[in-house]
Amino acid sequence: MQESLVELIRRTSAEIPDDVHQAILTSLENEKKGSLAANAIKIIDQNIALAKQKSQPICQDTGSILFYVDVPVGYDEITFAETAREAVKEATKKGFLRQNSVDSLTGRNDGTNVGHGAPAFHFHQHRSPEVSVKLVLKGGGCENVGAQYSLPNEKLHANRDLDGCRRAILDAVLQAQGKGCGPGILGVCIGGDRATGYELSKTQFLRRLEDRNPNAELDALEQDILKTSNELGIGPMGFGGKTTLLGVKICAANRVPASFFVSVSYMCWAYRRQGVALNCESKIQKWLY
Amino acid sequence: MIKLTFPFTKEKILALKVGDEVLISGVVFTGRDAVHKYLHEGGKLPAGVSLKDGIIYHCGPVMMKQPDGSWKCTAAGPTTSIREEPYQGQIIHDFGVRGVIGKGGMGDRTMEACKENGCVYLHAVGGAAQVLAECVKKVRNVYFAAEFGAPEAIWELEIEDFPAVVTIDAHGNSLHKVILARSTAALEERL
């Protein structure tokens, strides 16, 4: 098991998923040749190739380590978490992860990447016998430009409706400018409480970039936010250009009548997301992205 | 592409303008959150570190210790610079810094300090840790590793042809201000 998880971490850190790479290549075609935007994307593309070839982190900020684990009923989650924590320590020693976890009170970094709340585990039971482990490494730069809005918001003229959600989400894109290492990908949750809203917004990063939202209203909103954001001229790294976002993924969750949150998570272009299905011996049976 | 080589004299820095693409070669020192806070609070640079006519790089690299005791830089992209906005202007002034490499841009106070002191902000491609690590030819030394931890330490690096874009120049111009104003107006039309 530990070996499989170290390999999952290595590949997540060093190899960009195909759907993301494809979107980056497409964006290069859209940018003006020789522009700052095109040159930035070229460096990004070179970096993707180099990281894969050298089996080294795409970005030195190997980020928050987020495990999403689907397990059958009766599965031993405690042992899984213990093993995964050891796998994180091993992957850190091997340089697939930076020494990236800091005690918030003392400021101490013990160099293991393991501590209270780190890595983070999200277990979900399902009725299938399959164990699948998805991993997202989310850097701090893009995490810092995430935003949560409580509607109504007078300043944004955002009411409790889809237009209000649109205004809030586009404000998040505007405020982020190039600080989140764009072109970025948005994960959004409409509704929920402050905690579940952010949590669900991040689960949107498990979706493939080219998929479409089965809910027609959310699908239309996703397409609209993507198109509008790319008309703002923020561009890769905030250098200006046509590619501000590579994708937008939105979900909705029930809320209490008194609250209406829009939670926006921003993912940088270095969108590190992978997953594996494990067989009964905990070996990697297949890759999920 | 403009070659910007050590020493980073005031004359070379004043010749740069917003939008210039540069390839930087020479010695630079990394410094991020802990270092900036420390210097801002009156901390002294360790012996051997001088930022005079130098470049500070907002970076927390991945470093692997080699069997012979030396360090190898295996990932070294820029970190978000705006977190250093409360400290940067003063540090540029106090230590004679000529260039700041980072990503995401910086605010008015840093822009003013660049203008007053003859300094530029050099935007590297965020996330391009491997391309930029290839430009690190040698890790010469590390300071404050025990106090601040590896990502936050001051690393003395020799870099060669490190690509960056001048997004704040020494003449009061900022690409970040221009893009923010333009995108704010563009959004207003689309609401």
Image (tube, coloured by chain):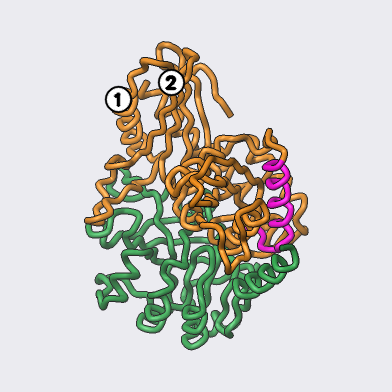
Q: Where does the magenta region start and end?
A: A217-236
Q: Earlier in the sequence, mark 2 or mark 1?
A: 2
- List x then y, in percent, for residue A20: 63, 40
Q: Percent from the top left, x then y, of residue A70?
A: 46, 24
Q: Position of residue A77 (x, y in %)?
A: 34, 23
Residue A71 is marked as 2
Measuring 46% from the left and 76% from the top, which residue is drawn there? B7
Q: CA distance from mark 2 to mark 1?
A: 12 Å
Three-letter residue code for mark 2: Val
Protein chain holding label 2: A
Badge 1: residue crowd in 10 Å (few <14, some 14–19, many ≥20): few
Q: Residue B160's mark?
A: none
Under tag 1, what secondary structure?
helix
Q: Which hue is chain A drawn in?
A: orange
In the picture shown, does residue B23 fall above or below A261? Answer: below
Tell which of A196 and A94 is nearer to you.
Answer: A196
Residues tagged 2 and 1 counted as in contact (Cβ below 8 A) = no
Label 1 sits on residue: A78
Foreground residue, B23 or A252?
Answer: A252
Quarter of the image with the C terminus of chain B in it: bottom right
Which chain is assigned green? Answer: B
**Residue A240 placement: quadrant:** bottom right
Q: Amino acid at mark 1?
A: Ile
In the image, residue A149 lies in the stretch drawn in magenta: no
> Front-most of B51 and A147?
A147
Decide: is B105 above or below A9: below
Q: Residue at x 27, y 76 (%)?
A: B41
